[in-house]
Amino acid sequence: MTKYSQIAIVDSMTPRSVEYYEKLKKVGVNDVIVTLSRSGYSSYSEIAEIHTDIARRLDMRVHAALSTDLRSPFHDARHFFSVYKYLGYNFGSKTMIMCHPDGNVKNQAKNLHELLGYISYFVNKDDLDVAISKDYLDEGVINLEDIPDYFNLTVINPDKLNAGVDRAGTWIYTEYFEDEIQLLGYDYYGFYTGQSNQ
């Protein structure tokens, strides 16, 4: 599996130090997906700014992520876009929509489509990635058919032999690195890295 290009998803749990990022680079991670906003957290932009700055200083490719519980698509999109613009992300940046559906939301698929519609106003559809845990797919919280196939699909399926979904363009294969909580993934078709190994 190590032949595939690697990515890291960074968020509030990721150490905010140059040394940590240098360790990521040493194992072949040159692309980081920075969580810019998270449902219910209005002050998340400070963390995103630090991670964006460190990665850019180390000449890593930086991509954006929105972590959503799918309760309020409009609010999530509005907050994400304000941080996206403030931190200098622009049209052409790859963007991950990381779904952690709230169990109280009755129509997750409808809300996901609504959110993707809002985000598509300022992010090209070809640059959008939908990320979801394999457990949510297995439990039918969101069905694979609910995710349009023109978006890249990232499956979060750590510590398994593979992504578990044939359609996956990216597989998050572990939750740990250097004794830290850290999502690392393989980018099969080069969606983030531009280096396809298929």
Image (cartoon, helix red, strand yellow):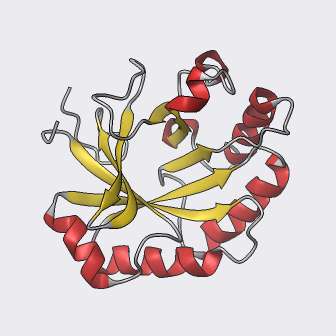
Left or right of 122? Residue 118 is: right
Give above or below for 125 relative to 145: below
Residue visible at 16% across and 60% down in the picture: 27
Give above or below for 48 relative to 174: below
Q: Position of residue 1 (x, y in %)?
A: 17, 36
Q: Nearer the viewer, residue 87 or 187?
A: 187
Q: Position of residue 124 (x, y in %)?
A: 57, 42
Which image quadrant is residue 15 in? bottom left
Left or right of 143? Residue 28 is: left
Residue visible at 45% across and 75% down in the picture: 51
Q: Nearer the viewer, residue 64 or 124?
A: 64
Quadrant that contains the C terminus: top left
Which image quadrant is residue 61 in? bottom left
Which image quadrant is residue 14 in? bottom left
Residue visible at 47% across and 50% down in the picture: 94
Q: Position of residue 38 (x, y in %)?
A: 67, 61
Residue visible at 27% across and 29% down in the picture: 161
Left or right of 171? Residue 119 is: right
Number of labelled discs? Answer: 0
Q: Nearer the viewer, residue 92 or 3?
A: 3
